[in-house]
Image: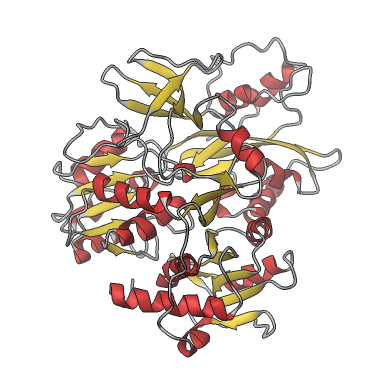
Amino acid sequence: PEEPTKFISYKELHEHTCRMANVLKSLGVKKGDRVVIYLPMIPEAAYAMLACARIGAIHSVVFAGFSPDALANRVNNCGSNLIITADEAPRGGRNTPLKVNADKALQDCDEDTKLLVVRRTNGDIPWNDNRNIDYNKVAKEVSPDSPAEEMNAEDPLFILYTSGSTGTPKGVVHTSGGYLLYAALTHEYVFDYQEGDVYWCTADVGWVTGHSYIVYGPLANGATSLMFEGVPTFPTASRFWEVCNKHKVNQFYTAPTAIRALMGLGDEWVNKCDLSTLRVLGTVGEPINPEAWNWYNKVIGKGNCPIVDTWWQTETGGHLITPLPGAVPTKPGSATLPFLGIEPVILEPEKGHEIDSVEAEGVLCIGDSWPGQMRTVYGDHQRFMETYFQQYQGYYFTGDGCRRDKDGYYWITGRVDDVLNVSGHRMGTAEIESALVAYPDVAEAAVVGYPHPIKGQGIYAYVTLKSGAEYTDELKKTLEVWVRKEIGPIAKPDIIQWAPALPKTRSGKIMRRILRKIAENDYGSLGDTSTLAEPSVVDELIENRPET
């Protein structure tokens, strides 16, 4: 906040993008090559994405909060030999050592992999002339013009990794034509974007919301949009509202997690600022609870701004179920109605038949294609088909449960697979379990979600130790640090419960349904436990559940 605001015109954006494109070409990057981007929320992140698109390279952005191990896994999976990173990433008054993290990742990557380093803080960083290139230096030496590569509509534009119900993240592939069309179309209609408006999405480009609604959608529409490097509570809890006030923001798009956190800090932080220019408010990443919706509507929007509660996924490229502001009456907590051309269906989970009645509850699927849908899982088309199209033949399987009310409005009820939604970010339980089990003293782990007042879902880990290992609070702290290192801070368990044994069927399958109930403090409806090999395990877990 103490640094001056940068204003970047479309002409300057073009020049910066072309310089980045020419730097990439000078390093041998060509059409079809994969480039990993590991940057904070700085303009160079957008330049890098657009430069890749301009020369036909396929970018894969990795969230700057991810660990070196997570970065290396993604670099190796997509076969990239170039990582664009920064020296450091300022966040909340501290600097994250991105270059150091990238150096650690390089230890597990092909020896030809290089780092293109943007100087963000000019901090003191280790340097290897054989593998490191100073972007700020070489960008001055290249032309500010670079002709755009001709691309087919179905050529890949980017790969973005998202957690799945199995251990390894999936490389979601989006293409040049349909994705860009859909991002632009949904941005214009869902936010009622008009020429001259100032639009702000608070997401990070490391997630799909940043791709679709910071970079591609708004820029394709010629929008004036904000890019924010920081956190909503630093240096004070007025930060978001000060930015809205200063730049006279018209459309504001953020996550329920942020809304709940700011709501809990009190209205006085909001009331210091003039929010009269706001016209449309949006939420993204997870269902918003009615209490937070009403606060957002009353305190931020002063009752004058429609709230677009947008439901969509990394895989969908853009909004699928959402109100259109001013046209669709809203209900707190409901994503309301499908976007233009989208055909949601609710299926009976066991038999897979479509529930035709207006009021229905079951598995949410999509009945027909749309321009922005993903085309494959990078390097594993079979996994793509098995995950999304073979669960229920003839339908796209979203992985979400859903309820449709008497007015035909859709209410997302949460994941039906083993994927958590933590602060609006998807985390595979298997990925966290794998990280825990990688620790030498851990024999077994099971991870479930539980209701969290700020994050929506928290991470609850049951951990069984190897024989001879001691169950101590110190080890719990060690495991938290371990998971942060293996995956990143967003994957750190909120609660670790020691579990000398886990509830399993006689065939050895962990009964996660029971673990979820215990995590939720809901012991009255554990359901059928007759198939458990050792029913006493459940009583022991309930008795030893940590106080929360």
Residue at image position (36%, 42%) is 319
Residue 454 falls in image quadrant = top left
Q: In this view, which residue lies farthest toward the right?
A: 468
Q: In this view, which residue lies farthest toward the bottom?
A: 141
Q: Total marks drawn?
A: 0
Q: Can residue 349 be seen in this view?
A: yes
Could you say which is closer to the camera, residue 88 or residue 378? Answer: 378
Q: Is residue 8 visible?
A: no
Where does the image place residue 159, in percent across and percent down from the top left? Answer: 55, 54
User: What's the image's color scheme?
Assistant: secondary structure
Where does the image place residue 444, in percent across and percent down from the top left? Answer: 76, 37
Where does the image place residue 348, in percent across and percent down from the top left? Answer: 49, 16
Could you say which is closer to the camera, residue 293 or residue 534? Answer: 293
Residue at image position (51%, 65%) is 56
Could you say which is closer to the camera, residue 421 or residue 188? Answer: 188
The N terminus, quarter of image: bottom left
Vertical relation: 91 (above or below) 179: below
Q: In the figure, is residue 245 to the left or right of 370?
A: left
Residue 204 falls in image quadrant = bottom left
Residue 513 falls in image quadrant = top right
Vertical relation: 278 (above or below) 343: below
Residue at image position (73%, 15%) is 532
Q: In the figure, is residue 124 to the left or right of 254?
A: right
Where does the image place residue 314, in percent across and percent down from the top left? Answer: 48, 45
Could you say which is closer to the camera, residue 195 or residue 169? Answer: 195
